[in-house]
């Protein structure tokens, strides 16, 4: 049993609470006690603001290697994708383990301690399975364990190379390693993946570009039968809508509705180009939406109607997706700040709304509804943000939540505990020397 005394903590609601004692027994909170004004002698003292662990509900770990290399020039999403495919082509299970351990280490340092990894680089470059067909997924699970983050491996069904009016295209040479032969071989492979106290398995369908309606129906039924989360990229680009209409005569959202994909187990990632009818369908079905604003900016996707989606009945989560930056505060505040630029209105999302998206709703989106809250019985996953940096100093209790949400960066995270285990202390990762490991893994992948 370990006691942590928090100078300030967010227990839900619109303000932080001063003097909160977190009693951790094993991997859960045995008690959360407010109004403990002085730290007990044997408690660890956490200065600053303690939050539940932030959730990164949409990650492709290897995209981290592209940071800075793909962000200049006049390229589109589609030319960015060609560069991303070139990095994907060079991955091996060993390289992916080293890169992902460092990337998950960067997430841990940012307080993004619960991760949904949308994983589609499954096989050898020519599409032949490895001796263990889950070699890549196992490398990611091992990397997350060693970096100390809680992971849901969202193993992704990817069958086709795109679609147009004439039908679905075959996988291109660079997409071949993403694809399973059919939905049954995808399911057999995924069902062989292990779960652990800090890792769960979920499903993803890459997009309506890569998964046909019959396969969407199959994966939706598979995920409902198992109570497993199901994620899918939705309408990130207007071209996807055009292609879907050309073949199916409906929007991607309508197609997902018709095939049983939408619902509370489902998270639609991006939902940038959705119309009024799509928003209503997503809201009525209580589908979750994962906003990835830093990626959506970087790829010139557009600004998703996140406030309208929430008003329609959706819950929101955040993801760092392409890892143009890894900073949960930046993703969360962008939901409101980008909305201000797009609409000329302020305050459609409250600080509490955005913190809920960054914590409990993000965790639930990736199948961890038993964390993301500082409450008795929940998994003991929490992060502390120091308030004494030049960015945050001068903050009082009343302003602490807004200061952190609107001005903190990943660098302000001082301490991270996952399942009762300290992963970050004093801003330093306990197990991974993150910066040099990132440098070595990226150089190995991109420059060798
Ligand atoms: Zn993505």
Image (cartoon, rainbow, N blue to C red):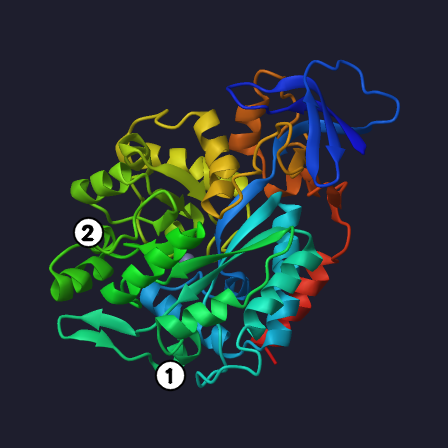
Where does label 1 land, which residue? 173
- Mark 1 Cα-neighbour bin, 10 Å: few <14, some 14–19, many ≥20: few
Per the image, label 2 sits on a secondary structure element best described as helix
The quarter of the picture where residue 55 lies is top right
Residue 376 shown left or right of residue 189 in the figure: right
Q: Are marks 2 and 1 in contact (CB under 8 Å)?
A: no
Front residue of 394/152: it is 152
Q: Is residue 194 above or below residue 380?
A: below
Q: Is residue 212 visible?
A: no
Residue 190, position in %: x, y? 48, 66
Where does label 2 land, which residue? 254
Front residue of 194/82: it is 194
Q: Where does the N terminus fall, quadrant-wise? A: top right
Q: Where does the C terminus fall, quadrant-wise? A: bottom right
Residue 31 shown left or right of residue 259 in the figure: right
Residue 162, position in %: x, y? 27, 71
The quarter of the picture where residue 112 lies is top right
Which residue is painted at 65% across and 42% down in the image? 411
As measured in the structure, the alpha-carbon distance from the residue carrying label 2 to the one carrying label 1 is 30 Å
Mark number displayed over residue 202: none
Q: Is residue 146 above or below residue 178?
A: above
Residue 161, position in %: x, y? 30, 74
Per the image, label 1 sits on a secondary structure element best described as helix
Residue 235 shown left or right of residue 21 in the figure: left
Which residue is painted at 63% across and 53% down in the image? 106
Q: Is residue 356 visible?
A: yes
Q: Earlier in the sequence, mark 2 or mark 1?
A: 1
Task: Kindly tell me whether mark 2's CB lies below 8 Å from ligand 1.
Answer: no
């Amino acid at each position: 049993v370990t006691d942590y005394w928090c100078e300030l903590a967010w227990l839900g609601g619109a303000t932080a609470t001063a003097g909160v004692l977190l009693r951790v027994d094993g991997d859960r909170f045995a008690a959360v006690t407010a109004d403990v004004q002085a730290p007990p002698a044997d408690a660890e003292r956490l200065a600053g603001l303690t939050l539940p662990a932030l959730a990164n509900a949409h990650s492709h770990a290897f995209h981290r290697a592209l940071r800075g290399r793909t962000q200049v020039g006049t390229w589109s999403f589609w030319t960015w994708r060609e560069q991303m495919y070139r990095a994907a082509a060079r991955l091996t299970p060993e390289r992916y383990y080293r890169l992902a351990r460092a990337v998950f280490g960067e997430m841990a340092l940012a307080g993004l301690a619960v991760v949904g990894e949308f994983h589609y680089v499954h096989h050898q470059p020519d599409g032949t399975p490895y001796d263990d067909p889950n070699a890549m997924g196992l490398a990611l699970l091992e990397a997350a364990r060693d970096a100390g983050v809680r992971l849901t491996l969202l193993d992704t069904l990817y069958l086709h190379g795109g679609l147009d009016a004439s039908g679905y295209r075959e996988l291109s040479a660079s997409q071949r390693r993403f694809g399973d032969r059919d939905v049954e071989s995808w399911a057999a492979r995924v069902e062989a993946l292990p779960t652990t106290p800090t890792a769960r398995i979920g499903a993803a369908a890459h997009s309506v570009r890569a998964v046909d309606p019959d396969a969407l129906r199959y994966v939706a039924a598979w995920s409902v039968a198992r109570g497993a989360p199901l994620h899918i990229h939705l309408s990130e680009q207007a071209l996807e809508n055009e292609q879907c209409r050309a073949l199916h005569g409906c929007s991607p959202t309508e197609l997902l509705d018709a095939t049983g994909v939408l619902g509370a187990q489902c998270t639609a990632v991006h939902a940038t180009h959705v119309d009024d009818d799509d928003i209503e369908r997503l809201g009525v079905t209580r589908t979750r939406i994962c906003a990835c604003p830093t990626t959506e900016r970087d790829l010139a996707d557009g600004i998703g109607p996140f406030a309208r989606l929430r008003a329609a009945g959706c819950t929101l989560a955040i993801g760092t997706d392409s890892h143009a930056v890894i900073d949960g505060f930046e993703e969360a505040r962008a939901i409101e700040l980008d909305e201000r630029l797009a609409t000329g209105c302020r305050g459609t999302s409250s600080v509490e709304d955005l913190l809920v998206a960054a914590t409990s709703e993000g965790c639930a989106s990736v199948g961890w509804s038993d964390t993301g809250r500082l409450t008795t019985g929940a998994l003991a996953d929490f992060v502390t943000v120091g308030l004494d940096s030049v960015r945050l100093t001068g903050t009082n209790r009343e302003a602490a939540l807004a200061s952190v949400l609107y001005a903190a960066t990943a660098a302000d995270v001082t301490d991270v505990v996952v399942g009762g285990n300290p992963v970050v202390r004093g801003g330093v990762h306990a197990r991974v020397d993150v910066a040099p490991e990132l440098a070595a893994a990226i150089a190995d992948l991109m420059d060798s």
